[in-house]
Protein backbone atom coordinates (compact mmCIF):
# COMPACT_ATOMS: atom_id res chain seq x y z
CA UNK A 1 0.00 0.00 0.00
CA UNK A 2 1.24 3.49 -0.84
CA UNK A 3 2.26 5.40 2.35
CA UNK A 4 0.50 8.62 3.22
CA UNK A 5 2.40 11.92 2.79
CA UNK A 6 3.58 13.94 5.80
CA UNK A 7 0.81 16.51 5.32
CA UNK A 8 -1.78 13.76 5.56
CA UNK A 9 -0.12 12.44 8.72
CA UNK A 10 -0.16 15.97 10.22
CA UNK A 11 -3.84 16.35 9.41
CA UNK A 12 -4.53 12.97 11.00
CA UNK A 13 -2.67 14.14 14.13
CA UNK A 14 -4.77 17.32 14.21
CA UNK A 15 -7.97 15.37 13.73
CA UNK A 16 -7.09 13.11 16.64
CA UNK A 17 -8.05 15.97 18.98
CA UNK A 18 -11.66 16.42 20.05
CA UNK A 19 -13.64 19.30 18.45
CA UNK A 20 -14.50 20.42 21.98
CA UNK A 21 -10.84 21.35 22.44
CA UNK A 22 -11.21 23.86 19.61
CA UNK A 23 -14.34 25.31 21.24
CA UNK A 24 -12.62 25.49 24.64
CA UNK A 25 -9.58 27.18 23.08
CA UNK A 26 -11.78 29.80 21.39
CA UNK A 27 -13.74 30.35 24.61
CA UNK A 28 -10.53 30.83 26.59
CA UNK A 29 -9.29 33.24 23.95
CA UNK A 30 -12.50 35.27 24.18
CA UNK A 31 -12.33 35.22 27.99
CA UNK A 32 -8.73 36.41 27.96
CA UNK A 33 -9.68 39.13 25.50
CA UNK A 34 -12.55 40.24 27.77
CA UNK A 35 -10.31 40.26 30.86
CA UNK A 36 -7.67 42.18 28.97
CA UNK A 37 -10.27 44.71 27.82
CA UNK A 38 -11.70 45.26 31.31
CA UNK A 39 -8.24 45.51 32.86
CA UNK A 40 -7.05 47.90 30.18
CA UNK A 41 -10.21 50.00 30.56
CA UNK A 42 -9.73 50.29 34.30
CA UNK A 43 -6.06 51.13 33.88
CA UNK A 44 -6.81 53.76 31.24
CA UNK A 45 -9.55 55.23 33.40
CA UNK A 46 -7.25 55.42 36.42
CA UNK A 47 -4.42 56.95 34.40
CA UNK A 48 -6.71 59.45 32.72
CA UNK A 49 -8.35 60.34 36.06
CA UNK A 50 -4.96 60.91 37.65
CA UNK A 51 -3.86 63.00 34.69
CA UNK A 52 -7.01 65.14 34.81
CA UNK A 53 -6.68 65.60 38.59
CA UNK A 54 -3.06 66.68 38.22
CA UNK A 55 -4.05 69.04 35.44
CA UNK A 56 -6.86 70.56 37.53
CA UNK A 57 -4.67 70.95 40.63
CA UNK A 58 -1.94 72.49 38.49
CA UNK A 59 -4.46 74.99 37.11
CA UNK A 60 -5.55 75.87 40.66
CA UNK A 61 -1.93 76.41 41.75
CA UNK A 62 -1.33 78.45 38.62
CA UNK A 63 -4.31 80.72 39.31
CA UNK A 64 -3.32 81.23 42.97
CA UNK A 65 0.34 81.96 42.24
CA UNK A 66 -0.51 84.15 39.26
CA UNK A 67 -2.97 86.22 41.34
CA UNK A 68 -0.45 86.55 44.17
CA UNK A 69 2.31 87.74 41.84
CA UNK A 70 -0.07 90.21 40.22
CA UNK A 71 -0.94 91.73 43.57
CA UNK A 72 2.73 91.98 44.49
CA UNK A 73 3.42 93.74 41.24
CA UNK A 74 0.49 96.06 42.02
CA UNK A 75 2.06 96.96 45.36
CA UNK A 76 5.46 97.57 43.82
CA UNK A 77 4.11 99.83 41.09
CA UNK A 78 2.14 102.00 43.60
CA UNK A 79 -0.63 102.16 41.07
CA UNK A 80 -4.35 102.11 41.82
CA UNK A 81 -5.29 99.12 43.99
CA UNK A 82 -6.69 96.20 41.99
CA UNK A 83 -9.04 93.89 43.85
CA UNK A 84 -8.19 90.22 44.50
CA UNK A 85 -11.21 89.03 42.51
CA UNK A 86 -9.97 90.90 39.49
CA UNK A 87 -6.49 89.39 39.82
CA UNK A 88 -7.98 85.91 40.10
CA UNK A 89 -10.31 86.62 37.18
CA UNK A 90 -7.37 87.54 34.98
CA UNK A 91 -5.52 84.36 35.95
CA UNK A 92 -8.60 82.24 35.27
CA UNK A 93 -9.02 83.73 31.83
CA UNK A 94 -5.45 82.76 31.08
CA UNK A 95 -6.07 79.27 32.43
CA UNK A 96 -9.14 78.53 30.26
CA UNK A 97 -7.09 79.32 27.20
CA UNK A 98 -5.29 76.01 27.77
CA UNK A 99 -6.59 73.11 25.58
CA UNK A 100 -9.09 70.84 27.30
CA UNK A 101 -10.07 73.43 29.98
CA UNK A 102 -13.78 74.24 29.80
CA UNK A 103 -14.24 76.46 32.87
CA UNK A 104 -12.70 77.59 36.16
CA UNK A 105 -14.56 79.29 39.00
CA UNK A 106 -14.05 80.33 42.59
CA UNK A 107 -17.10 80.01 44.88
CA UNK A 108 -17.89 80.54 48.54
CA UNK A 109 -19.60 78.13 50.91
CA UNK A 110 -23.07 79.18 49.70
CA UNK A 111 -22.31 78.48 46.05
CA UNK A 112 -21.96 82.08 44.95
CA UNK A 113 -19.48 82.54 42.12
CA UNK A 114 -16.83 85.10 43.01
CA UNK A 115 -14.75 84.70 39.86
CA UNK A 116 -15.17 82.49 36.81
CA UNK A 117 -13.97 82.01 33.27
CA UNK A 118 -15.02 79.73 30.41
CA UNK A 119 -18.43 78.07 30.27
CA UNK A 120 -21.22 79.61 32.35
CA UNK A 121 -19.00 82.54 33.26
CA UNK A 122 -22.04 84.82 33.39
CA UNK A 123 -23.76 82.78 36.10
CA UNK A 124 -23.89 84.23 39.60
CA UNK A 125 -24.08 80.92 41.38
CA UNK A 126 -23.59 77.25 40.73
CA UNK A 127 -26.47 74.80 40.22
CA UNK A 128 -27.83 72.66 43.02
CA UNK A 129 -26.15 69.45 41.76
CA UNK A 130 -22.75 71.10 41.77
CA UNK A 131 -23.40 72.61 45.18
CA UNK A 132 -24.28 69.17 46.57
CA UNK A 133 -21.10 67.87 44.99
CA UNK A 134 -18.80 70.47 46.61
CA UNK A 135 -20.52 70.05 49.98
CA UNK A 136 -18.82 66.66 50.21
CA UNK A 137 -15.47 68.39 50.82
CA UNK A 138 -14.48 67.76 54.42
CA UNK A 139 -13.38 70.62 56.62
CA UNK A 140 -9.97 70.33 58.24
CA UNK A 141 -8.48 67.85 55.72
CA UNK A 142 -5.51 69.45 53.98
CA UNK A 143 -4.80 68.84 50.28
CA UNK A 144 -8.25 67.39 49.80
CA UNK A 145 -10.01 67.33 46.42
CA UNK A 146 -13.03 65.61 44.92
CA UNK A 147 -13.84 64.78 41.31
CA UNK A 148 -16.68 63.47 39.16
CA UNK A 149 -17.70 62.96 35.55
CA UNK A 150 -20.78 64.86 34.38
CA UNK A 151 -22.84 64.46 31.23
CA UNK A 152 -23.74 67.43 29.11
CA UNK A 153 -24.80 68.70 25.74
CA UNK A 154 -22.39 70.77 23.72
CA UNK A 155 -23.56 72.14 20.38
CA UNK A 156 -26.38 69.63 20.20
CA UNK A 157 -23.91 66.79 20.74
CA UNK A 158 -23.60 64.62 23.82
CA UNK A 159 -20.34 65.09 25.69
CA UNK A 160 -18.80 64.37 29.07
CA UNK A 161 -16.78 66.64 31.34
CA UNK A 162 -14.50 66.07 34.29
CA UNK A 163 -15.15 68.27 37.34
CA UNK A 164 -12.57 68.79 40.11
CA UNK A 165 -13.20 70.73 43.36
CA UNK A 166 -10.63 71.69 46.03
CA UNK A 167 -10.19 74.27 48.79
CA UNK A 168 -8.68 77.57 47.75
CA UNK A 169 -6.88 77.51 51.10
CA UNK A 170 -7.50 74.74 53.60
CA UNK A 171 -10.01 76.06 56.23
CA UNK A 172 -9.19 76.26 59.94
CA UNK A 173 -5.49 76.70 59.21
CA UNK A 174 -3.32 79.31 60.98
CA UNK A 175 -3.02 81.69 58.04
CA UNK A 176 -2.40 85.39 58.36
CA UNK A 177 -2.96 88.01 55.68
CA UNK A 178 0.69 88.89 55.88
CA UNK A 179 1.54 85.29 54.92
CA UNK A 180 0.69 86.46 51.45
CA UNK A 181 4.20 87.91 51.35
CA UNK A 182 5.74 84.57 52.32
CA UNK A 183 7.75 83.36 55.31
CA UNK A 184 11.40 83.56 56.24
CA UNK A 185 13.87 86.46 56.34
CA UNK A 186 12.46 88.03 53.16
CA UNK A 187 9.05 88.54 54.73
CA UNK A 188 10.29 91.31 57.14
CA UNK A 189 12.01 93.14 54.33
CA UNK A 190 8.81 92.98 52.26
CA UNK A 191 6.72 94.27 55.14
CA UNK A 192 9.15 97.18 55.85
CA UNK A 193 9.31 97.98 52.17
CA UNK A 194 5.51 98.26 51.78
CA UNK A 195 4.83 99.62 55.29
CA UNK A 196 4.24 103.16 54.03
CA UNK A 197 2.21 102.04 51.01
CA UNK A 198 -1.38 103.30 51.43
CA UNK A 199 -2.70 100.20 49.57
CA UNK A 200 -1.19 97.73 52.06
CA UNK A 201 -4.00 98.04 54.57
CA UNK A 202 -6.64 97.56 51.86
CA UNK A 203 -4.83 94.52 50.54
CA UNK A 204 -4.52 92.99 54.03
CA UNK A 205 -8.21 93.56 54.56
CA UNK A 206 -8.94 91.94 51.19
CA UNK A 207 -6.82 88.90 52.04
CA UNK A 208 -8.43 88.56 55.48
CA UNK A 209 -11.83 88.49 53.82
CA UNK A 210 -10.70 85.74 51.43
CA UNK A 211 -9.19 83.70 54.21
CA UNK A 212 -12.34 83.87 56.30
CA UNK A 213 -14.57 83.04 53.33
CA UNK A 214 -13.38 79.44 52.94
CA UNK A 215 -13.43 79.61 49.13
CA UNK A 216 -13.50 76.62 46.77
CA UNK A 217 -12.01 76.16 43.31
CA UNK A 218 -14.07 74.25 40.71
CA UNK A 219 -12.25 73.26 37.52
CA UNK A 220 -14.14 71.62 34.65
CA UNK A 221 -12.08 69.81 32.03
CA UNK A 222 -13.04 68.27 28.69
CA UNK A 223 -13.47 64.50 29.01
CA UNK A 224 -13.44 63.98 25.23
CA UNK A 225 -9.77 62.97 25.18
CA UNK A 226 -10.49 60.13 27.57
CA UNK A 227 -13.65 59.02 25.75
CA UNK A 228 -11.85 59.15 22.39
CA UNK A 229 -9.12 56.94 23.86
CA UNK A 230 -11.77 54.55 25.14
CA UNK A 231 -13.48 54.57 21.77
CA UNK A 232 -10.20 53.65 20.12
CA UNK A 233 -9.73 50.91 22.67
CA UNK A 234 -13.27 49.63 22.14
CA UNK A 235 -12.66 49.74 18.41
CA UNK A 236 -9.52 47.65 18.91
CA UNK A 237 -11.50 45.23 21.07
CA UNK A 238 -14.19 44.97 18.40
CA UNK A 239 -11.54 44.37 15.74
CA UNK A 240 -9.84 41.75 17.92
CA UNK A 241 -13.21 40.13 18.62
CA UNK A 242 -14.00 40.01 14.92
CA UNK A 243 -10.55 38.57 14.20
CA UNK A 244 -11.02 36.00 16.96
CA UNK A 245 -14.45 35.12 15.61
CA UNK A 246 -13.03 34.79 12.12
CA UNK A 247 -10.21 32.63 13.46
CA UNK A 248 -12.75 30.46 15.27
CA UNK A 249 -14.88 30.20 12.12
CA UNK A 250 -11.78 29.43 10.06
CA UNK A 251 -10.74 26.82 12.62
CA UNK A 252 -14.19 25.25 12.55
CA UNK A 253 -14.24 25.26 8.75
CA UNK A 254 -10.71 23.85 8.71
CA UNK A 255 -11.75 21.15 11.16
CA UNK A 256 -14.80 20.30 9.06
CA UNK A 257 -12.62 20.26 5.94
CA UNK A 258 -10.05 18.07 7.63
CA UNK A 259 -12.79 15.77 8.85
CA UNK A 260 -13.99 15.46 5.29
CA UNK A 261 -10.41 14.91 4.16
CA UNK A 262 -9.94 12.26 6.82
CA UNK A 263 -13.15 10.58 5.73
CA UNK A 264 -11.92 10.66 2.13
CA UNK A 265 -8.55 9.29 3.19
CA UNK A 266 -10.20 6.54 5.20
CA UNK A 267 -12.41 5.70 2.23
CA UNK A 268 -9.34 5.73 0.00
CA UNK A 269 -7.40 3.51 2.41
CA UNK A 270 -10.36 1.15 2.70
CA UNK A 271 -10.70 1.09 -1.09
CA UNK A 272 -6.97 0.43 -1.46
CA UNK A 273 -7.13 -2.35 1.11
CA UNK A 274 -10.15 -3.85 -0.61
CA UNK A 275 -8.42 -3.55 -3.98
CA UNK A 276 -5.24 -5.15 -2.61
CA UNK A 277 -7.22 -8.01 -1.08
CA UNK A 278 -9.25 -8.42 -4.26
CA UNK A 279 -6.16 -8.42 -6.49
CA UNK A 280 -4.22 -10.76 -4.21
CA UNK A 281 -7.13 -13.21 -3.96
CA UNK A 282 -7.79 -13.42 -7.70
CA UNK A 283 -7.49 -17.01 -8.94
CA UNK A 284 -5.56 -15.78 -11.97
CA UNK A 285 -2.24 -13.97 -12.15
CA UNK A 286 -2.25 -10.20 -12.63
CA UNK A 287 0.66 -7.95 -13.54
CA UNK A 288 0.05 -4.22 -14.13
CA UNK A 289 2.41 -1.49 -15.30
CA UNK A 290 2.10 2.30 -15.12
CA UNK A 291 2.37 4.84 -17.94
CA UNK A 292 6.18 4.55 -17.82
CA UNK A 293 6.10 0.78 -18.31
CA UNK A 294 7.18 0.04 -14.72
CA UNK A 295 5.53 -2.87 -12.89
CA UNK A 296 3.40 -1.56 -10.01
CA UNK A 297 1.13 -4.52 -9.24
CA UNK A 298 1.89 -8.24 -9.17
CA UNK A 299 -0.41 -10.50 -7.19
CA UNK A 300 0.58 -13.68 -5.38
CA UNK A 301 -1.07 -15.93 -7.98
CA UNK A 302 1.20 -14.51 -10.68
CA UNK A 303 4.21 -15.06 -8.42
CA UNK A 304 3.19 -18.67 -7.77
CA UNK A 305 2.67 -19.39 -11.47
CA UNK A 306 5.99 -17.86 -12.54
CA UNK A 307 7.91 -18.92 -9.43
CA UNK A 308 9.12 -15.39 -8.66
CA UNK A 309 9.11 -13.07 -5.66
CA UNK A 310 6.41 -10.46 -6.30
CA UNK A 311 8.12 -7.89 -4.09
CA UNK A 312 11.32 -7.97 -6.14
CA UNK A 313 9.75 -7.32 -9.53
CA UNK A 314 7.72 -4.30 -8.43
CA UNK A 315 9.41 -1.14 -9.63
CA UNK A 316 11.14 -2.90 -12.54
CA UNK A 317 10.36 -3.06 -16.24
CA UNK A 318 9.03 -6.35 -17.68
CA UNK A 319 12.11 -6.91 -19.89
CA UNK A 320 14.30 -7.25 -16.80
CA UNK A 321 12.31 -9.65 -14.64
CA UNK A 322 9.76 -11.54 -16.78
CA UNK A 323 10.18 -14.44 -19.26
CA UNK A 324 10.33 -13.42 -22.95
CA UNK A 325 6.95 -15.00 -23.68
CA UNK A 326 5.29 -12.60 -21.22
CA UNK A 327 7.35 -9.54 -22.18
CA UNK A 328 6.05 -9.50 -25.75
CA UNK A 329 2.50 -9.11 -24.43
CA UNK A 330 3.34 -5.61 -23.20
CA UNK A 331 3.08 -3.04 -25.99
CA UNK A 332 5.05 -0.25 -24.26
CA UNK A 333 4.76 3.07 -26.11
CA UNK A 334 3.30 1.42 -29.20
CA UNK A 335 -0.36 1.90 -28.35
CA UNK A 336 -1.90 1.97 -31.81
CA UNK A 337 -4.10 -1.03 -31.06
CA UNK A 338 -5.75 -0.85 -27.64
CA UNK A 339 -7.87 -3.98 -28.11
CA UNK A 340 -7.38 -6.95 -25.81
CA UNK A 341 -4.84 -9.48 -27.03
CA UNK A 342 -4.82 -13.17 -26.08
CA UNK A 343 -2.26 -15.89 -26.60
CA UNK A 344 -1.31 -19.33 -25.28
CA UNK A 345 2.35 -20.07 -24.68
CA UNK A 346 4.41 -23.00 -23.42
CA UNK A 347 6.62 -21.94 -20.51
CA UNK A 348 9.34 -24.44 -19.63
CA UNK A 349 10.91 -22.86 -16.54
CA UNK A 350 11.07 -26.39 -15.09
CA UNK A 351 11.81 -29.06 -17.76
CA UNK A 352 9.98 -31.63 -15.66
CA UNK A 353 6.86 -29.50 -15.39
CA UNK A 354 6.34 -27.35 -18.48
CA UNK A 355 3.37 -25.04 -18.16
CA UNK A 356 0.77 -23.96 -20.67
CA UNK A 357 -0.24 -20.36 -19.94
CA UNK A 358 -3.11 -18.36 -21.35
CA UNK A 359 -2.14 -14.67 -21.55
CA UNK A 360 -4.49 -11.71 -22.02
CA UNK A 361 -3.19 -8.14 -22.12
CA UNK A 362 -5.08 -4.88 -22.32
CA UNK A 363 -4.26 -1.17 -22.32
CA UNK A 364 -5.68 1.14 -19.64
CA UNK A 365 -6.43 4.75 -20.68
CA UNK A 366 -7.16 7.74 -18.44
CA UNK A 367 -9.96 10.29 -18.90
CA UNK A 368 -7.91 12.13 -21.53
CA UNK A 369 -7.36 8.94 -23.53
CA UNK A 370 -3.71 8.92 -22.53
CA UNK A 371 -1.87 5.77 -21.58
CA UNK A 372 -2.30 5.02 -17.87
CA UNK A 373 -0.76 1.55 -17.92
CA UNK A 374 -1.16 -2.04 -19.07
CA UNK A 375 -2.61 -5.13 -17.45
CA UNK A 376 -1.52 -8.70 -18.14
CA UNK A 377 -3.72 -11.58 -16.97
CA UNK A 378 -2.09 -14.99 -16.61
CA UNK A 379 -3.97 -18.26 -16.33
CA UNK A 380 -2.29 -21.62 -15.86
CA UNK A 381 -3.92 -24.07 -18.28
CA UNK A 382 -1.52 -26.93 -17.61
CA UNK A 383 -3.92 -28.95 -15.54
CA UNK A 384 -6.85 -28.05 -17.79
CA UNK A 385 -4.96 -29.17 -20.89
CA UNK A 386 -3.83 -32.30 -19.09
CA UNK A 387 -7.39 -33.07 -18.08
CA UNK A 388 -8.55 -32.41 -21.63
CA UNK A 389 -5.98 -34.89 -22.92
CA UNK A 390 -6.92 -37.41 -20.26
CA UNK A 391 -10.57 -36.98 -21.14
CA UNK A 392 -9.89 -37.42 -24.83
CA UNK A 393 -7.71 -40.42 -24.08
CA UNK A 394 -10.35 -41.90 -21.78
CA UNK A 395 -13.04 -41.41 -24.39
CA UNK A 396 -10.81 -42.93 -27.06
CA UNK A 397 -9.85 -45.85 -24.85
CA UNK A 398 -13.44 -46.38 -23.78
CA UNK A 399 -14.52 -46.63 -27.41
CA UNK A 400 -11.57 -48.86 -28.16
CA UNK A 401 -12.37 -51.03 -25.14
CA UNK A 402 -15.98 -51.49 -26.22
CA UNK A 403 -14.90 -52.42 -29.70
CA UNK A 404 -12.17 -54.74 -28.38
CA UNK A 405 -14.60 -56.47 -26.06
CA UNK A 406 -16.94 -57.11 -28.94
CA UNK A 407 -14.17 -58.36 -31.21
CA UNK A 408 -12.69 -60.56 -28.48
CA UNK A 409 -16.07 -62.10 -27.80
CA UNK A 410 -16.52 -62.85 -31.47
CA UNK A 411 -12.99 -64.27 -31.80
CA UNK A 412 -13.06 -66.60 -28.82
CA UNK A 413 -15.62 -69.02 -30.29
CA UNK A 414 -13.71 -69.52 -33.57
CA UNK A 415 -10.47 -69.87 -31.60
CA UNK A 416 -12.02 -72.60 -29.45
CA UNK A 417 -13.09 -74.44 -32.58
CA UNK A 418 -9.63 -74.05 -34.13
CA UNK A 419 -7.96 -75.31 -30.98
CA UNK A 420 -10.31 -78.32 -30.82
CA UNK A 421 -9.71 -79.23 -34.46
CA UNK A 422 -5.96 -78.86 -33.96
CA UNK A 423 -6.05 -81.24 -30.98
CA UNK A 424 -8.19 -83.71 -32.98
CA UNK A 425 -5.85 -83.44 -35.94
CA UNK A 426 -2.86 -84.11 -33.70
CA UNK A 427 -4.47 -87.29 -32.31
CA UNK A 428 -4.99 -88.73 -35.77
CA UNK A 429 -1.43 -88.08 -36.92
CA UNK A 430 1.54 -90.26 -36.15
CA UNK A 431 3.53 -89.34 -33.05
CA UNK A 432 6.67 -88.26 -34.89
CA UNK A 433 5.44 -86.86 -38.10
CA UNK A 434 5.77 -83.26 -39.25
CA UNK A 435 2.02 -82.87 -38.99
CA UNK A 436 2.18 -83.30 -35.21
CA UNK A 437 4.62 -80.42 -34.87
CA UNK A 438 2.39 -78.28 -37.02
CA UNK A 439 -0.59 -79.12 -34.82
CA UNK A 440 1.41 -78.23 -31.68
CA UNK A 441 2.39 -74.87 -33.14
CA UNK A 442 -1.22 -74.24 -34.05
CA UNK A 443 -2.41 -75.03 -30.53
CA UNK A 444 0.28 -72.81 -28.91
CA UNK A 445 -0.55 -69.86 -31.16
CA UNK A 446 -4.24 -70.24 -30.44
CA UNK A 447 -3.50 -70.26 -26.69
CA UNK A 448 -1.26 -67.13 -27.02
CA UNK A 449 -3.97 -65.38 -28.99
CA UNK A 450 -6.50 -66.38 -26.34
CA UNK A 451 -4.29 -64.90 -23.60
CA UNK A 452 -4.04 -61.64 -25.54
CA UNK A 453 -7.79 -61.56 -25.89
CA UNK A 454 -8.06 -62.17 -22.13
CA UNK A 455 -5.77 -59.25 -21.40
CA UNK A 456 -7.81 -57.08 -23.74
CA UNK A 457 -10.99 -58.06 -21.94
CA UNK A 458 -9.37 -57.33 -18.59
CA UNK A 459 -8.46 -53.83 -19.83
CA UNK A 460 -11.88 -53.17 -21.30
CA UNK A 461 -14.10 -54.37 -18.45
CA UNK A 462 -14.62 -52.25 -15.27
CA UNK A 463 -12.16 -53.16 -12.53
CA UNK A 464 -13.32 -54.81 -9.35
CA UNK A 465 -11.06 -53.64 -6.52
CA UNK A 466 -10.74 -55.34 -3.19
CA UNK A 467 -9.65 -52.41 -1.06
CA UNK A 468 -8.03 -52.69 2.34
CA UNK A 469 -5.88 -50.51 4.62
CA UNK A 470 -2.32 -51.21 3.60
CA UNK A 471 1.20 -49.94 4.15
CA UNK A 472 2.81 -49.00 0.83
CA UNK A 473 6.24 -50.04 2.07
CA UNK A 474 5.18 -53.66 2.62
CA UNK A 475 3.85 -53.97 -0.94
CA UNK A 476 7.03 -52.49 -2.44
CA UNK A 477 9.36 -54.72 -0.38
CA UNK A 478 7.53 -57.89 -1.43
CA UNK A 479 7.42 -56.83 -5.09
CA UNK A 480 11.10 -55.87 -5.16
CA UNK A 481 12.01 -59.30 -3.75
CA UNK A 482 10.36 -60.90 -6.81
CA UNK A 483 12.67 -59.10 -9.25
CA UNK A 484 15.84 -59.22 -7.11
CA UNK A 485 17.22 -62.24 -8.99
CA UNK A 486 16.51 -60.68 -12.42
CA UNK A 487 18.20 -57.43 -11.36
CA UNK A 488 21.33 -59.27 -10.22
CA UNK A 489 21.47 -61.23 -13.45
CA UNK A 490 21.45 -57.94 -15.44
CA UNK A 491 24.05 -56.44 -13.06
CA UNK A 492 21.59 -53.80 -11.91
CA UNK A 493 22.23 -52.01 -8.63
CA UNK A 494 18.82 -51.87 -6.94
CA UNK A 495 18.44 -49.13 -4.32
CA UNK A 496 15.45 -49.03 -2.00
CA UNK A 497 14.61 -45.77 -0.15
CA UNK A 498 11.31 -45.90 1.70
CA UNK A 499 10.18 -42.90 3.71
CA UNK A 500 9.53 -43.50 7.39
CA UNK A 501 6.10 -43.01 8.98
CA UNK A 502 4.15 -42.83 5.75
CA UNK A 503 0.37 -42.90 6.32
CA UNK A 504 -1.64 -45.97 5.43
CA UNK A 505 -3.59 -46.08 2.17
CA UNK A 506 -6.70 -48.00 1.15
CA UNK A 507 -5.82 -49.96 -2.00
CA UNK A 508 -6.22 -53.35 -3.70
CA UNK A 509 -2.98 -55.07 -2.67
CA UNK A 510 -2.85 -57.48 -5.64
CA UNK A 511 -3.65 -54.82 -8.23
CA UNK A 512 -1.07 -52.39 -6.80
CA UNK A 513 1.54 -55.20 -6.62
CA UNK A 514 0.79 -55.93 -10.31
CA UNK A 515 1.43 -52.25 -11.19
CA UNK A 516 4.73 -52.04 -9.27
CA UNK A 517 5.92 -55.37 -10.71
CA UNK A 518 5.14 -54.22 -14.26
CA UNK A 519 7.06 -50.97 -13.75
CA UNK A 520 10.07 -52.78 -12.23
CA UNK A 521 10.21 -55.28 -15.10
CA UNK A 522 10.03 -52.44 -17.66
CA UNK A 523 12.91 -50.68 -15.85
CA UNK A 524 15.04 -53.84 -15.79
CA UNK A 525 14.38 -54.47 -19.49
CA UNK A 526 15.44 -50.85 -20.24
CA UNK A 527 18.95 -51.58 -18.80
CA UNK A 528 20.32 -54.58 -20.77
CA UNK A 529 23.87 -53.54 -19.91
CA UNK A 530 23.20 -52.93 -16.22
CA UNK A 531 22.74 -49.71 -14.34
CA UNK A 532 21.00 -48.30 -11.31
CA UNK A 533 17.37 -48.82 -10.30
CA UNK A 534 16.00 -46.67 -7.45
CA UNK A 535 12.68 -47.21 -5.73
CA UNK A 536 11.61 -44.70 -3.10
CA UNK A 537 8.49 -43.27 -1.49
CA UNK A 538 7.56 -39.84 -0.15
CA UNK A 539 4.59 -37.78 0.88
CA UNK A 540 3.37 -34.80 -1.15
CA UNK A 541 0.47 -33.07 0.60
CA UNK A 542 -2.46 -35.47 0.59
CA UNK A 543 -0.74 -37.98 -1.68
CA UNK A 544 1.70 -40.85 -1.23
CA UNK A 545 4.17 -40.95 -4.13
CA UNK A 546 5.99 -44.07 -5.41
CA UNK A 547 9.02 -43.12 -7.55
CA UNK A 548 10.78 -45.70 -9.75
CA UNK A 549 13.84 -44.33 -11.57
CA UNK A 550 16.22 -46.24 -13.85
CA UNK A 551 19.36 -45.24 -15.72
CA UNK A 552 18.38 -47.04 -18.90
CA UNK A 553 17.98 -46.09 -22.55
CA UNK A 554 15.11 -43.66 -21.84
CA UNK A 555 12.08 -42.82 -23.96
CA UNK A 556 12.23 -40.55 -27.01
CA UNK A 557 10.13 -37.37 -26.67
CA UNK A 558 7.85 -38.36 -29.55
CA UNK A 559 6.92 -41.60 -27.74
CA UNK A 560 6.57 -40.09 -24.24
CA UNK A 561 2.98 -38.95 -24.84
CA UNK A 562 1.92 -42.35 -26.22
CA UNK A 563 3.28 -44.77 -23.64
CA UNK A 564 -0.13 -45.17 -21.97
CA UNK A 565 -1.95 -45.89 -25.23
CA UNK A 566 -3.11 -49.52 -25.64
CA UNK A 567 -1.01 -51.69 -28.00
CA UNK A 568 1.74 -49.07 -28.24
CA UNK A 569 5.06 -50.82 -27.60
CA UNK A 570 8.66 -50.75 -28.78
CA UNK A 571 9.37 -54.35 -27.65
CA UNK A 572 9.46 -57.15 -30.17
CA UNK A 573 7.38 -59.49 -28.02
CA UNK A 574 5.32 -56.94 -26.07
CA UNK A 575 1.54 -56.57 -26.24
CA UNK A 576 1.46 -52.82 -25.46
CA UNK A 577 -1.09 -53.26 -22.69
CA UNK A 578 1.19 -53.28 -19.63
CA UNK A 579 1.47 -49.52 -18.99
CA UNK A 580 -2.06 -48.87 -20.20
CA UNK A 581 -3.45 -51.45 -17.77
CA UNK A 582 -1.23 -50.09 -14.94
CA UNK A 583 -2.42 -46.51 -15.55
CA UNK A 584 -6.03 -47.76 -15.57
CA UNK A 585 -5.56 -49.46 -12.19
CA UNK A 586 -4.05 -46.31 -10.63
CA UNK A 587 -6.89 -44.18 -12.02
CA UNK A 588 -9.42 -46.59 -10.49
CA UNK A 589 -7.72 -45.92 -7.14
CA UNK A 590 -8.17 -42.14 -7.62
CA UNK A 591 -4.49 -41.53 -8.33
CA UNK A 592 -2.32 -40.51 -11.28
CA UNK A 593 0.75 -41.81 -13.03
CA UNK A 594 3.39 -39.59 -14.68
CA UNK A 595 6.50 -40.48 -16.68
CA UNK A 596 9.58 -38.26 -17.17
CA UNK A 597 12.44 -39.35 -19.36
CA UNK A 598 15.57 -38.16 -21.15
CA UNK A 599 16.98 -40.50 -23.86
CA UNK A 600 20.14 -42.35 -22.82
CA UNK A 601 19.98 -40.81 -19.33
CA UNK A 602 17.01 -41.85 -17.22
CA UNK A 603 13.33 -42.71 -17.00
CA UNK A 604 11.30 -41.84 -13.91
CA UNK A 605 7.78 -43.03 -13.18
CA UNK A 606 5.76 -41.33 -10.40
CA UNK A 607 2.71 -43.12 -9.02
CA UNK A 608 0.56 -40.86 -6.78
CA UNK A 609 -2.11 -42.39 -4.55
CA UNK A 610 -4.48 -40.44 -2.28
CA UNK A 611 -4.09 -40.91 1.46
Image (tube, rainbow, N blue to C red):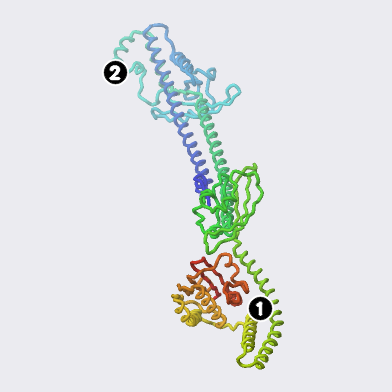
Which residue is at the front of the view, 211 or 523?
523
In x, y percent, where is residue 92? Answer: 46, 17
Q: Which residue is mark 2?
A: 184
Query: Which residue is depicted at the point 43% across and 10% down?
Result: 82
Left/right placement of residue 385 relative to residue 126 reads right
In x, y percent, where is residue 202? Answer: 40, 12
In x, y percent, where is residue 22? Answer: 52, 46
Task: State which tag comes first along the sequence, 1 or 2.
Answer: 2
Farthest residue, direction front: 433
Which residue is at the front of the view, 566 or 1?
566
Figure quadrant of residue 273: bottom right
Image mark for residue 216: none
Q: CA distance from mark 1 to mark 2?
A: 159 Å
Point out the frontmost of discs 1 and 2.
1
Element type at marker 1? helix
Q: Which residue is mark 1?
A: 460
Element type at marker 2? loop
| Callout 1–callout 2 Cβ contact below 8 Å | no
Amino acid sequence: MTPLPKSAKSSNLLLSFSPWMLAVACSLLMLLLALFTVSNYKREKELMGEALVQKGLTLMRFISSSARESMRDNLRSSETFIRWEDQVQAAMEQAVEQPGVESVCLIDQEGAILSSAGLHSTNKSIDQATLSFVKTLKVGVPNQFISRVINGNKGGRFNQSFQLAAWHLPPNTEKHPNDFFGRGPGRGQMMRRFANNPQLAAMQEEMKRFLDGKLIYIVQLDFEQFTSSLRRQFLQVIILSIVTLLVAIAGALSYITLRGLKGSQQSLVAMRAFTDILVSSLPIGLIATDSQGVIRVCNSCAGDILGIDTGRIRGKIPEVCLPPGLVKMFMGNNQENTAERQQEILLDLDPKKPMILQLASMVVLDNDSHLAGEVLLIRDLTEVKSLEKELQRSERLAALGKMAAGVAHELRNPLSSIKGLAVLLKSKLSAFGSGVETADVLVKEVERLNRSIGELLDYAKPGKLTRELTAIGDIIKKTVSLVQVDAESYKIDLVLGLAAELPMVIVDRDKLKQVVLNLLLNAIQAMPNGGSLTVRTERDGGMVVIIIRDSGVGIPPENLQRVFDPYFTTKNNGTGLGLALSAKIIEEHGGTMKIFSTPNEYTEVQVMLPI
